[in-house]
Image: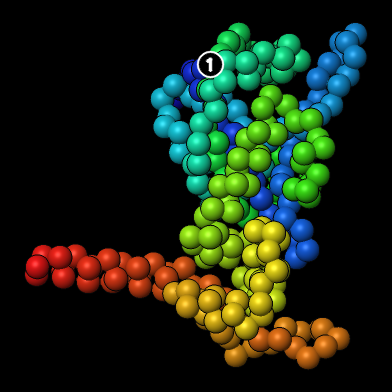
Amino acid sequence: MAKRLLKYNPHISVDCSVFGFDGKQLKVLLIERNIGGDNEDLFSDKKLPGSIIYEDEDLDTAAVRILNELTGLKNIYLSQFRSFGDPERTSNPRDKNWLERTMKMRVGRIVTVGYVALIKISRKISFESENTTARWYDVKILPSMELAFDHNLIAGEALSHIRRQVMLEPQVLFELLPRKFTMTQLRNLYDIVLGTKSDVRNFQKKMLQIEGLEQLDEVQKNVPYRAPKLYRFDKKKAKSTRNKTRKNKEDVSVGL
């Protein structure tokens, strides 16, 4: 069977702000972009993982596909947070030339849809292209970097989105932690994301109210101090509890 020819939509793209946590710093994943060659000056800078979508795919499908193609990542937390449509966002000749070479097509104005991805930083990242490299960078240095297109703006808005989410649903932080973690690790991540300094007792009391957070009969190993208890977050249990709560509310509503 002949392979179906896929047609790009030259006016819509998705860009993913991928965040990870190494235990000390919140990191963002940036892809290195090489421009030039063939008797031109070689220029390198950084960009967020992203690309133009196909004509026949929706945005969420495109985000999953593009992130997988660029990083090899699958089954991760991915959330759409806003779109970016400044007419000047592709006006830099360097950006436009690179994009047209890469996509092998002429491009004009492009509206991009921003996604946030949260992953465990220990996950292996791989690439289809041998010319593609990526590194984790501390989010604190983002303001001093000059990223491609308007990716500084997108990454900054993605950080603001995460902070708002954490205030409302702190359980999103579990996407950044190891499968088993200590309460101190959770508190450190919470404070780094929000720029706060939490009280130890009050923080633990607040976190233990989250459905699905379980204390294990295990302690952290190979530490030079008193081994702290380990915790884990059970997504299935949390989802089941939310569904039961929603059903109970619906039943009460019907009864009224």
Q: Which residue is mark 1?
A: 10
The residue depicted at 53 percent of the width and 76 percent of the height is: 206
Percent position of residue 73, x then y:
62, 48
The residue depicted at 68 percent of the width and 55 percent of the height is: 20
> Is 34 rendered above or below residue 214?
above
Q: Quadrant of residue 173?
A: bottom right
The residue depicted at 42 percent of the width and 71 percent of the height is: 238
**For the C terminus, which image quadrant?**
bottom left
Q: Secondary structure at mark 1?
A: strand
Q: Quadrant of residue 97?
A: top right
**For the N terminus, which image quadrant?**
top left
Q: Is residue 119 left or right of residue 95?
A: left
Q: Is residue 36 visible?
A: yes
Q: Residues within 10 Å of mark 1 (few under 14, many from 20)?
A: many
Q: Quadrant of residue 42?
A: top right
Percent position of residue 76, x then y:
55, 53
> Is 153 rendered above or below residue 251?
above
Q: Is residue 42 left or right of residue 159?
A: right
Percent position of residue 188, x then y:
71, 69
Nearest the eye: 113 or 128: 113
Nearest the eye: 55 or 208: 208
> Is 218 rendered above or below residue 189?
below
Which amino acid is tagged 1? Pro
The colouring scheme, among rainbow, by chain, secondary structure or one colour, is rainbow
The residue depicted at 72 percent of the width and 18 percent of the height is: 95
Percent position of residue 7, x then y:
49, 18
Q: Is residue 128 visible?
A: no
Q: Is residue 256 left or right of residue 206?
A: left
> Is 134 rendered above or below residue 25?
above
Q: Is residue 23 left or right of residue 10?
A: right
